[in-house]
Image: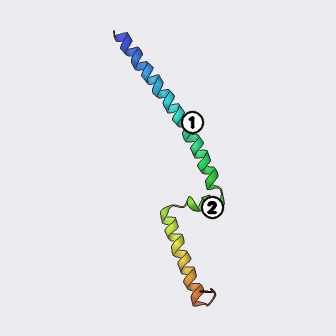
Amino acid sequence: MTENIENLVLEHLRGIRGTLADHGERLDRIDLRLSTIEQTPLGGLYALSASDRDALTHLTRRVERIEQRLSLSDA
């Protein structure tokens, strides 16, 4: 009886190990795809964190105000 329980546990552990291996391979493929996307110019913009985007927006507005004050922009 104990031997059957041990075999059952080992069988489940083997199944879990196989599932983890599948997930690891899938995660590797996703990581590769994401790295490829981030290397494109447009993808690099999307890769910015929220704070980086906020800082970029702030700097863009400052440059626009400076251009307006110096009459460098059309607006």
Q: Who's the residue at 47% across and 23% down the image? A: 14
Q: Is residue 57 above or below residue 23?
A: below
Q: Find the residue positioned furthest to the front.
A: 75
CA gap between label 2 and label 1 equals 27 Å
Q: Who's the residue at 53% across and 36% down the image? A: 24
Q: Who's the residue at 51% across and 75% down the image? A: 58
The image position of residue 31, as x and y in percent, is: 58, 45
Q: Nearer the viewer, residue 33 or 70?
A: 33
Q: Find the residue positioned furthest to the right.
A: 40
The image position of residue 19, as x and y in percent, is: 49, 30
| Disc on res. 61 | none
Q: Amino acid at mark 1?
A: Glu
The secondary structure type at the circle numbered 2 is helix
Q: Are marks 2 and 1 in contact (CB under 8 Å)?
A: no
| Disc on res. 25 | 1
Judging by the rendered image, the residue that carries numbered circle 2 is 42
Left/right of residue 48 with respect to residue 10 in the rendered view: right
Q: Quarter-wise, where is residue 73 in the image?
A: bottom right
The secondary structure type at the circle numbered 1 is helix
Image quarter in which the C terminus is found: bottom right
Q: Is residue 73 above or below residue 36?
A: below
Q: Give the mark count.
A: 2
Q: Is residue 49 above or below residue 56?
A: above
The image position of residue 54, as x and y in percent, is: 49, 69
| Neighbour tally class for label 2: few under 14, some 14-19, many 20 plus, Cα within 10 Å | few
| Neighbour tally class for label 1: few under 14, some 14-19, many 20 plus, Cα within 10 Å | few
Q: Amino acid at mark 2?
A: Leu
Colouring mode (rainbow / by chain / secondary structure / one colour)? rainbow
Q: Is residue 38 above or below residue 18?
A: below
Left/right of residue 19 with respect to residue 68 in the rendered view: left
Image quarter in which the N terminus is found: top left
